[in-house]
Amino acid sequence: MKSLTQPLSQVDPDIAGLIAKEAHRQEEGIELIASENTVSQAVLEAMGSVFTNKYSEGYSGKRYYGGNEVVDEMESLAVNRAKALFGAEHVNVQPLSGSPANLAVYMAVAKPGDKVLGLKLDHGGHLSHGHPVNFSGLMYNFVQYEVDEKTCRIDMNRVREVALKERPRMIIAGFSAYSRDIDWKAFKSIADEVGAVTFGDIAHIAGLIAGKALENPVPIFDIVTTTTHKTLRGPRGAIIMCKSQFQKDIDRTVFPGIQGGPHDHVNAAKAVCFQEALQPSFQEYARQVIRNAQALSAELMSRGYRVLTDGTDNHLLVVDLRSKDLAGKAAEVALDKIGISCSRSTIPFDTRKAMDPSGIRLGSPAMTTRGMGEAEARLIGGFIDKAIMKSGDEAVLARIHGDVKELCKRFPLYL
Ligand code: DSN
């Protein structure tokens, strides 16, 4: 039997090579996918730790396997740090990712067929907020609100009208392609009026909330979920925060309702990311993320691009490319060629299909993590514009790609 301590490069050179190749891609490229970020070495180390060897169904002090005394300590630390970070009454750190976390909330609060109100996916919502092909739309009776056609903003009067008419069991606020502040208190007041449970999905903006750059819905809402790998800059996973009255139902639904053994190595890494986010420097990071998104947005608007809602209050912007003669998919491909990753995006009332929609979504969390500021954001806006305007000219794209690599060299990640 081979030694457990043999390095990956000897055990599996194929995978070791691919990891090195991906690290190189990340080092040399600018990551503008709004839901991505770059974690610290400390988070990586915790994820690659011996906690991956353990089974620990249950919760701290109440496990179904022996040998969990250290896992109990680690999970309690993760829970307590998350509580401190968000001011939550209760936190479950075991959800494997955002969609399972949301599934747990639906199952804990509603019966199949119950009515739930959420924002439409192509208006900035999320698949798990009631899209017909997703479990949420299949299992629950979703009614959806939309953004205003002109302003592309959520109109709280309209949300109230729909809520009063439909009287849902639960109201969801929280989005994956919406750039403006959310009026959590207005959502709560509408929910109280119709007797609905409030569910906030802060997956995209959790890091900005933890960094005190945006208002925190956790003290206002009944239940809040977030992934830990976006602006929060932790490992891939999720948590559920709730008022004490929902604690039992949430915990029971996560385990044994949906999941088996928690991913203890990932939960250890979640604890590390909460610790990092509790530091004052994370607040400066959160503010810089927003400043960078605003600088990128201003640069693109000055070059004639329509940015939905005319700017952003958070880390992301959705750019409507209809006036540029290039749809979202082709723009994504052109940007890939210059070493900039982004995601194509539908725009509200889009007449094109989701696979090739009319826009792109850009985000600043990862570029900010590597130390770039507003000057770089404006420079990147220029690269994007040139690549979109010259998407058919391989020589121009290659030249911009060279500029992107040069810029990245000035802001190394792990090297
Ligand atoms: N896939 C994520 C995003 O890009 O917004 C949401 O789950």
Image (spheres, grey):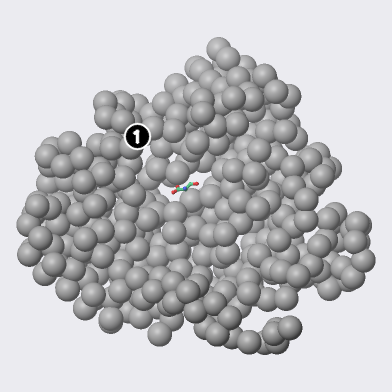
The residue to which callout 1 is attached is: 354
Q: Spot the residue most to the front.
A: 1
Q: In this view, does 26 lie to the left or right of 92?
A: left
Residue found 17% across the figure and 62% down from its top: 383
For residue 302, say whether it is visible. no
Identify which residue, 277 or 144, lies in the foreground: 144
Q: Spot the residue most to the top.
A: 165
Q: Where is residue 274 in the image (x, y as percent from the top left)?
A: 62, 67
Q: In this view, does 31 lie to the left or right of 277?
A: left
Identify which residue, 257 or 205, lies in the foreground: 257
Place residue 279 in its image quadrant. Answer: bottom right
Q: Residues within 10 Å of mark 1 (few under 14, many from 20)?
A: some
Residue found 26% across the figure and 50% down from its top: 332
Identify which residue, 1 or 63, lies in the foreground: 1
Identify which residue, 403 or 318, lies in the foreground: 403
Q: Where is residue 189 in the image (x, y as percent from the top left)?
A: 60, 30
Q: Is residue 84 left or right of residue 360?
A: right
Name the residue type under label 1. Ala
Q: Where is residue 133 in the image (x, y as percent from the top left)?
A: 51, 28
Residue found 39% across the figure and 32% down from its top: 122
Q: Is residue 335 above or below residue 163?
A: below
